Image (cartoon, helix red, strand yellow):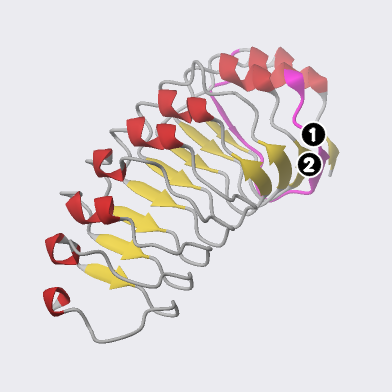
Amino acid sequence: SGNISENLGNLKEMIYLSVSGNQLSGILPTSIGELTKLTYLDFSGNNLTGQVPPSLKNCSQITNLKLENNNLEGEFSLIFENMISLERMDLSNNKLTGIPENIGKLTSLQYLNLDKNLLTSLPDSLNQLKALQTLSANSNKISRLPENMNQFTSLNTLNLANNELTTFHQDLCLLPNLASINLSYNNITRLPSMISELNVRILEIQENELTGAIPANLL
């Protein structure tokens, strides 16, 4: 338990660091940016607060970043400038209110979990993540999705349940590899005219505001 010491930055040869499931509190130290050989970083399941230090962008070799189940808050710091090796990132169950536009620089990212935060929108630059296979932002306050979602050509799983969406984004019907969509518990009032183009195996749209007859092109 307790705060994380700035002396953490002295461990310059470290490539794998996991301190998940403890009772660490306070903020992540700025010195973490000195661990430039890290490929795996896991601080999940602690009581960390505040924002992630921008110095983390110096850890350009990280492939897996796990910060879920903490109390990180505010606009997520601009750490993505150099993290081009990042493949998996879990920021779920925090108090984040925004994701910066330069998340689009994470061109190797395959898995992104933003569940259970305080997000109201997702940045348009997400559509630059050509390698992204799983995007989950369940249980936020999202009412707006990125433009040109048809550019998510590798996307396999999309979970946007428990948000404040009012429309079923028509671009989702054009994604060639999308197998699962969960849009349940939103405020969607109608299905897109291109719903018949969907190639998914799982479609969850229960507990929305849909009315009228079942569209013939859905069957």
In-image side of 2 versus 89 (left or right): right
Q: CA distance from mark 2 to mark 1?
A: 5 Å
Magenta span: predominant SS is: loop
Which of 8 and 26 lies nearest the eye of the viewer?
A: 26
Name the residue rendered at 43%, 36% in the picture: 124
Q: Position of residue 64 (x, y in %)?
A: 47, 34
Question: Is 206 above or below relative to 178?
Answer: below
Which residue bears the numbered disc 1?
27
Q: Position of residue 158 (x, y in %)?
A: 35, 55
Which of 131 and 19 lies nearest the eye of the viewer?
A: 131
Name the residue rendered at 42%, 72% in the picture: 184
Q: Specify the quadrant that holds the N terminus.
A: top right
In-image side of 52 versus 206 (left or right): right
Which residue bears the numbered disc 2?
49
Q: Amino acid at mark 2?
A: Thr
In the rendering, which numbered label is found on residue 50?
Answer: none
Q: Position of residue 187 (x, y in %)?
A: 48, 71
Q: Residue 21: say if magenta.
A: yes
Q: Secondary structure at mark 2?
A: strand
Q: Which residues are magenta?
A: 13-30
Q: Are marks 2 and 1 in contact (CB under 8 Å)?
A: yes
- Residue 168, by quadrant, is bottom left
Which of 131 and 141 lies nearest the eye of the viewer?
A: 141
In-image side of 179 versus 7 (left or right): left
In-image side of 94 versus 50 (left or right): left
